[in-house]
Image (cartoon, helix red, strand yellow):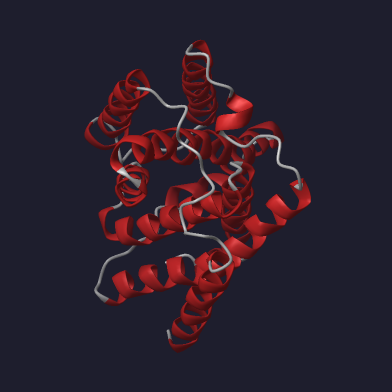
Amino acid sequence: MGLLLVLSFLGLGAWWLLLRSQPGPFSRVHSESWRVGDAVFAGVLAGFLLLLFVAGGDQNAKMTPDAVNGTITLDLMLLAVVLVTIASHGISLREVFGLAPARPLLVLGMGVLCLAATYPIFMLAGEVALKLGHSVSDDADTVKYLLGPLKPQDKAAAILLAVVVAPLVEEFIFRGFLYGVTKKFAGAWAAMATSGLVFAAIHQNLPALPAYFLLASGLTLAYERTGSIWTPIAMHVLFNAITVIVIFFFPQWIH
């Protein structure tokens, strides 16, 4: 706990250094292209996500190959609907999401730095919840699934979902779309809070909500640091990859 406190303070200091060179912490994600119709769609999408994953989700459902493959399909279909809807409004996906940064290696490297600054803060929030008697881990079923007698293709599908599909879909939807649209009409702070709360809620773990909200805030600031969605995507990919590595090699670390 003491080490996590020190690392968290260092993380906060790193964030201060990362953001101090900008005119403001929310200056590089441009939201001028979004329209009222996009705001309506964003509200409907946020409501749908909350209904699907919170009100209608079955927290006792077990992971199965069919469930994993179904989730991959559903996530990619949802992303396709969002991107096609945005593009149909005449909005350039390349421009609004910063898909073609001038310095791509710097953008990806910034994701690594931002994760290093955020990860101990996320872990500290989880440890605080644990000290209060609440388990924040939602990985128990994932551990049993990945370490169970799976076919190689089923294990690969689960890893693909965690390390590639989920980060791509969630970053385009939460940071790229929901945050960007809300920033246009309600301001950056409200956008970070709103998109972060929805992101935290879909993980269906109330004790872990503060930790996931802090992670979402770090992902948003990473997006603002470069103005490219690739930065939080890289950050999210590494975050989930660490979780997968822990599951395979250090499952005893999961509370």
The one of 141 and 20 positioned closer to us in this rendering: 20
The x and y percentages for residue 183 are 37, 41
Quarter residue 65 falls in = top right
Assign the C terminus to one quadrant of the image.
Answer: bottom left
Residue at (33% x, 58% y) in the render: 208
Q: Outermost residue toward the left?
A: 55
Q: Outermost residue toward the front?
A: 23
Residue at (50% x, 11% y) in the render: 88
Image: 209 above or below 60: below
The one of 77 and 116 positioned closer to us in this rendering: 116
The x and y percentages for residue 135 are 32, 64
Quarter residue 214 falls in = bottom left
Q: Outermost residue toward the top?
A: 88
Can residue 147 be seen by looking at this rendering?
A: no
The x and y percentages for residue 106 are 74, 54
The one of 238 and 29 positioned closer to us in this rendering: 29
Assign the N terminus to one quadrant of the image.
Answer: bottom left
Image: 200 above or below 178: below
The x and y percentages for residue 205 are 31, 51
Image: 10 above or below 144: below
> Is 217 positioned to the left or the right of 250 in the image?
left
The one of 251 and 111 positioned closer to us in this rendering: 111
Can residue 238 be seen by looking at this rendering?
A: yes
Q: Number of callouts in the render?
A: 0
Residue at (69% x, 32% y) in the render: 153
> Is 99 positioned to the left or the right of 31 in the image?
right
Residue at (29% x, 22% y) in the render: 40
